[in-house]
Image (tube, helix red, strand yellow):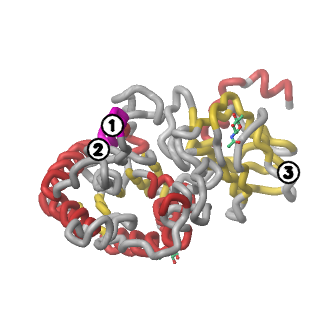
Amino acid sequence: MVRISTLLPVFAAMATSQATRLLGRVNPATKELTWSATGISFAFTGTSASVPITSLWGSNSIQMVIDDGAPIVTDNVTGSSIETPTLAKGKHKVEIRKKSEALYGSVTFGDVKVTGGKLEKDKVPKRRMQIIGDSITAGYGLDGVAPCAPSAALENAPKTYAGLTAKNLSADYDIVAWSGVGLLRNYASAGEPDTQPKMPERWTRWGANDADNSYTFPASDTPDIVVVNLGTNDFSYLGVREPMQESTFADAMFAFGSTLRRHYPKAEFFFTSSPMLGDTWPTVEDAQHTTHANAVKSAVKRLGRRTHFVEFPTQGAEVGCDSHPTGATHASMAVILTAAIEDVLH
Ligand SMILES: *[C@@H]1O[C@H](CO)[C@@H](O)[C@H](O)[C@H]1NC(C)=O
Ligand SMILES: *[C@@H]1O[C@H](CO)[C@@H](O)[C@H](O)[C@H]1NC(C)=O
């Protein structure tokens, strides 16, 4: 065995790259897992597998799903590898994904090692979704019960409406999300100028911490479905700045939507309202949920064919950390989004 594999290094490398797939938007040059729900997927025959950690920074919460079973969660990845438990001899499928987003940290995996067997070819889903958003799409505070302090461990991107909808549709998915991000302006914070990049800029990056315009739009990653859930942060203003105007936001959404369409001319686009905006807070006059939704609808109308508006209603009283949607709210959003997409795709 050892002798043969040293004789055929090229062949072995090919077999590995076919069998191991990076999930989400991951720069193949660095393999750094930054964005929410990025990860690795592989299938193998044998009794266990080990995934070496070659680089790590910050806090990273991950989950490992084996043979579609219950997720095995690690709240904060440490050490030099991630190991499957010892499994029954046979064929197994493993999917490891980050639960937490790029701002908390990143992790890089090396080549998977299998005990008592070998890597097998992994099935590649036919459909691909890209979901662009903010903390809602990153699953910020999803695993917490308010009041709670947000953390990497309490984020859960695979359990967001985005992850659940992709699962419903048996689609591969790329989440491009960053908590606090806006389309025109980020979350309102008193006394600090808003110098952080907005989503139209962050979206041009391969890894979340790579340079602007580093993403190369590889044909193999082209999504069939694009979901945009932005504006919750643009609309925050209380005590800090002027309220966002409907027409200003509509213009910005139209501009970003036009950019997206240029890159993905064949995709179906779904632009959503915000479950975190309501019509009674901060003021009834603002009617933020409706104002934002109307701006999105106006952009959708101007963008024309293959663009759709999806209404996520204002969430209920039960919330996760910092008033973010709970797992139950995300599940109900997934039902809405799945139906909207299935309506279009059949
Ligand atoms: C996670 O582990 C890293 C060390 O790898 C440490 O720096 C960090 O503080 C830990 N995060 C939490 C939330 O405990
Ligand atoms: C989609 O996902 C949600 C949440 O996981 C689930 O409740 C729903 O039944 C699924 N299927 C469809 C067709 O919406």
Q: Residue furthest top?
A: 7
Q: Which residue is mark 2?
A: 185
- Three-letter residue code for mark 2: Arg
3D distance between C-alphas at marks 1 and 2: 7 Å
Compare marks 2 and 3 and give the one earlier in the sequence.
Answer: 3
Give the image quarter of residue 157.
bottom right
User: Residue 262: where, in percent of width, then height?
Assistant: 22, 44
Which structural element holds mark 1?
Answer: loop
Magenta-colored span:
191-201
Q: Magenta span: helix, strand or loop, mainly?
A: loop
Q: Are marks 1 and 3 in contact (CB under 8 Å)?
A: no
Q: Residue at x 32, y 63 (%)?
A: 272
Q: Are marks 1 and 2 in contact (CB under 8 Å)?
A: yes
Give the image quarter of residue 196.
top left
**Local crowd at mark 2 within 10 Å, few (<14), some, or many (≥20)?**
many
Q: Residue at x 49, y 68 (%)?
A: 330
**Local crowd at mark 1 within 10 Å, few (<14), some, or many (≥20)?**
few
User: Residue 216: where, in percent of width, then height?
Assistant: 37, 32
In front: mark 1 or mark 2?
1
Q: Which residue is mark 1?
A: 194
On screen, residue 204 above or below 315:
above
Which structural element holds mark 2?
Answer: loop
3D distance between C-alphas at marks 2 and 3: 50 Å
Q: Which residue is mark 3?
A: 47
> Does the magenta segment cover residue 195?
yes
Residue 195 is left or right of residue 104, and the answer is left
User: Residue 266: where, in percent of width, then height?
Assistant: 27, 53
